[in-house]
Amino acid sequence: MAEGEGDFPLAEPGLWVERIGSRSFSAGLPALFLDRDGTINVDTGYPDDPAAMVLRDGIAPAIEVANQHGIPVVVVTNQSGIARGYFGWDAFSRVNGRVLELLAARSAVVDLVLACAYHEAGSGPLAIADHPMRKPNPGMLIEAARRLDLDLRRSLIVGDKPADMEAGWRAGLLRGWLVDGGATTISGLSVLPLCGAQDQEGLLTAIRAL
C-alpha cells in the first residue's frame, strides 16, 4: 500500500470499497447500480478537481426514489487515472466526497461506492490488464452483491458507456439504462436509452416497481 493510503477504504491496492452511512438492508434486495463520471456527474475526463463537479440532470431523482423505496444505491466506477499517475486516491476521495455532497443536497444518498484503479497503462501493482474488477468485467457488481447480499438479477444499472451495460449483463442483470444511448440488447440485458424526460420517468417507474 502506497504512502498515505492507510486512511482510505482500499480492499486491495486498486479497489476502493466504501460503505456510506448506516442504512441497513434486508437480504435479497435488488440494487440500483450507477456509474459515476458521465452518469451521475458531468464527465471532465480524468476528474481530480472537486470544484469542477456538476451533477447531470435526472440522476439525483432516481437515487432519491431508490432511497424512498429502500433500494440500495451502489456506485461502480472505473478510475484508470489513478493507475496512469494522473492523480491519487486522495484526489479521488475529495472528488467523490464532493459528488456525494451534491447528491445529498438534492436528498439523494448513495449506500456503497466501489472504484477500480487497475489498468494496463498503469505502473506497479495497478498495472493489470483486464482486471476482474474493471468494467466491462462484473467484479465490482459481484463484490457489492456479496457485501450487501443483493439480488443481482432484479437489479438495475445506469451508465454512459457500453462497458457499463456489459458489466451489468455479465453480473446477471436483466435491465440497464444507457445515458445518451439507444435501445438495444446485450445478450440477456435489455438496454434502454436515458436521454430525456420520458426516459427518466421510465427509469423512476422501474425503480418504484422493484
Image (cartoon, rainbow, N blue to C red):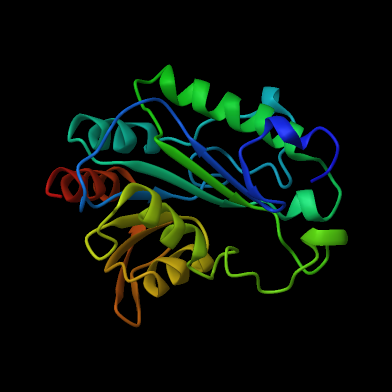
Residue 69 relative to residue 31: left or right: left
User: Up-down: is 206 above or below 163?
Assistant: above
Residue 131 relative to residue 103: left or right: right
**Residue placed most toward the observer, 103 or 154:** 154
Q: Most extreme residue toward the top, as rendered?
A: 105
Q: Which residue is rendered at x = 70% and y = 30% of the image?
A: 7
Figure label count = 0
Residue 121: % across, % down: 83, 66
Residue 95: % across, % down: 65, 30
Quarter residue 48 falls in: top right
User: Up-down: is 166 above or below 91?
Assistant: below
Q: Which residue is rendered at x = 69% and y = 22% of the image?
A: 51
Residue 120 relative to residue 75: left or right: right
Residue 201 relative to residue 5: left or right: left
User: Up-down: is 128 above or below 118?
Assistant: below
Residue 207 seen in render = yes
Residue 116: % across, % down: 63, 54
Q: Which residue is rendered at x = 78% and y = 59% of the image?
A: 126
**Residue placed most toward the observer, 169 or 145:** 145
Q: Most extreme residue toward the bottom, as rendered?
A: 187
Residue 75: % across, % down: 47, 45
Q: Which residue is rendered at x = 80% and y = 65% of the image?
A: 127
Residue 195 seen in render = no
**Residue placed most toward the observer, 106 or 201:** 106
Quarter residue 89 falls in: top right
